[in-house]
Amino acid sequence: MTTVRLFGERVSFRLHARTLWVCLALLVVTACALGAAMMLGDYPVPLSDALTAVFGDGSRMAELFVTRRRLPRALTAVLVGVALGVSGAVFQSLTRNPLGSPDIVGFGQGASTGAVLVLLVFGGGTTQTAAGAFVGGLLAAAVVYLLALNRGAHGYRLVLVGIGVSSMLIAFNNYLVTRADLNDARAATVWIVGSLFERRWPEAVLMAVAVAVLVPLAVVLGRVLSILDIGDAGATGLGVRVERARLALIVVAVALTAVATACAGPVAFVALVAPQVARRLTGSPGPGLLPAGLLGGALLLISDLVAQRVTSPGELPVGVVTGAVGGVYLAWLLAREWRSGRG
């Protein structure tokens, strides 16, 4: 049993050996991907020169490409992936449903709607678009929660209501794009898919602050997730204020999703895939917030590297790559469930 102090509160948890090794392996993979992200590009930079540039002693060209362009983009990818992975783990645990991730139940689409409205209707810039995405994600979450609230916002109801709200928001976003000027519509479409193009230090710093504050808060609040798995009646009997705990977890998870979407757009499937794959890798009971976050960071960074190089000298939006990976995983998951059902 290990005890740490977060936000002035003692938090105890068990260290699962396999989970620890998986987390260490994911950190190594992420570090290797970060090195590749700094090296690769139209202007290749050796790893030694890239590391020198990071510490301020590199050549002018290395500093331009590494510290001003590649490193902030790579760090943004990792931090966005961490936020989405943790958020997805919280929602899947709350809903007790593998489809209960924020991009499936409408929170990501709400952020998209807020950003697209600002971009196409009000002609806002980057900062205003990010703010619109944040507000849109929070409003969509509030609408889904209130519509699903009927003597407790139970998991299956959240998922069903969220899918319905998501479908309406997708239709509304498509309508806005079809009515927009061609150049604005192209920019909005790239944003809707999810992209890390031209992400710089402001986005990286914003994500770093959000992750530093919200992920530890999710870990503290996440202690009740395993208790909620036994059902509302059982959790109440153990002294958990169910709706208060559920609402607090939803607020934190939605905030993680909204900030991530504001910085990178509604990147598909990371929040869906990362928690499930992490759970299979660790073999550990419980929500597994930290492994899900680390896997989400590694997955999004590697996907962005693929998106940059697969059509070089151009690049794809990273959401295209994560959508392809997530689609394959979802098809495999459905096929596996179908075979197990027949068996």
Image: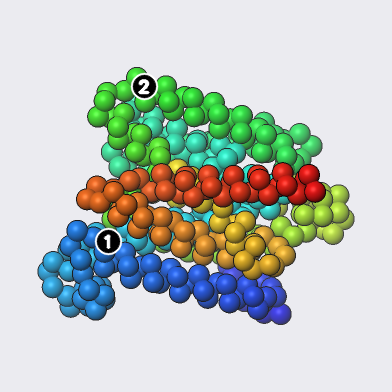
Closer to us: 17 or 110:
17
Residue 306, percent from left and from top: 36, 55
Q: Residues within 10 Å of mark 1 (few under 14, many from 20)?
A: many
Residue type at mark 1: give it. Arg
Q: Quadrant of residue 154?
A: top right
The residue shown at (44%, 28%) is 173
Q: Residue at x 31, y 29 (%)?
A: 185
Q: Is residue 207 visible?
A: no
Direction from residue 141 to residue 319 in the image, left or right: left
Classify 126 as above or below 79: above
Give the residue at the far left of this rendering. Answer: 60
In the picture, the disc for residue 70 is: 1
| Local secondary structure at mark 1 | helix
Snapshot quadrant of residue 265: top left
Number of marks: 2
Q: Which of the 4 image quadrants contains residue 187? A: top left
Determine which residue is flagged by label 2: 178
Q: How is the image coloured?
A: rainbow
